[in-house]
Amino acid sequence: MKVSTKGRYALRLMIDLGIHDTDGKYISLKDISARQNISIKYLEQIVTPLHRAGLVRSIRGAQGGYRLSKEPERYTAGEILRAIEGSFAPIACLETETNECRNYQSCPTVGFWEGMYRVISDYVDSVTLKQLIDEHLSSQQGGCVER
């Protein structure tokens, strides 16, 4: 499983919003682009599914921009990545809640794939945006934050 550039940049965008959303003002993609060294066009492609998923709010106009929909501690890395990447299921038959594969009961490898899926999901769902923000801020100050 590989996380795409869009997925990686989505986390960076959300961390940037979390750090700079201090007074409730909306943050422009231009500002995020300058800080993150990501083109505005690419950020537009990333922020659209995040907005659609309800993870960010937006306002148009001169004072427009984006901000988080909730506090950073209420986001998980998993929900952010899923908004961009979709399911983390390593095989197609695990993408739906009810496995409809006709070979499911006799499949010699399904247990392995289910375990892999569970480990990945548990990990990405255990890390909050707040933890990522704190870790980033700490690394900028030369410190270390434990998760």
Image: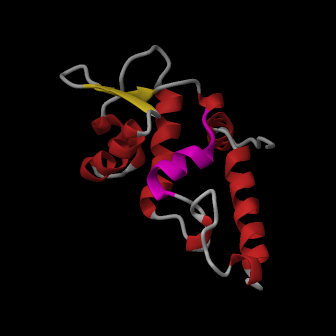
On screen, residue 47 versus residue 72, left or right, reads left
Disc tally is 0
Q: Nearer the viewer, residue 56 or 63?
A: 56
Q: Position of residue 4 (x, y in %)?
A: 47, 64
Does the segment drawn in magenta span residue 77?
A: yes
**Residue at figure coordinates x 62%, y 78% from the top left:** 102
**Which image quarter holds the N terminus?**
bottom right
Q: Is residue 44 above or below residue 107?
A: above
Q: Is residue 90 left or right of residue 42?
A: right
Quadrant of res 30: top left
Residue 136: give x, y in percent of width and height.
62, 42
The answer to whether residue 21 is above or below residue 40 is: above
In this rendering, the answer to whether 119 lies above or below 49 is below
* Residue at position x 30%, y 50% in the image: 45
Res. 1 in view: no
Residue shown at 57% from the left, 44% from the top: 79
Q: Is residue 121 magenta?
A: no
**Can residue 17 be seen at all in this image of the molecule?**
yes
| Residue 53 appears left or right of 90 | left
Q: Measuring 53% from the left and 51% from the top, which residue is drawn there?
A: 81
Q: Which residues are magenta?
A: 75-86
> Does 46 sit above or below residue 56?
below
**Residue furthest front as drawn:** 102
In x, y percent, where is residue 138?
Answer: 68, 38
Main secondary structure along the magenta-highlighted residues: helix
Q: Name the residue furthest top.
A: 23
The location of residue 113, given as percent across then percent down, is: 71, 74
Q: Dividing the image into 4 quarters, which one contains the C terminus?
A: top right
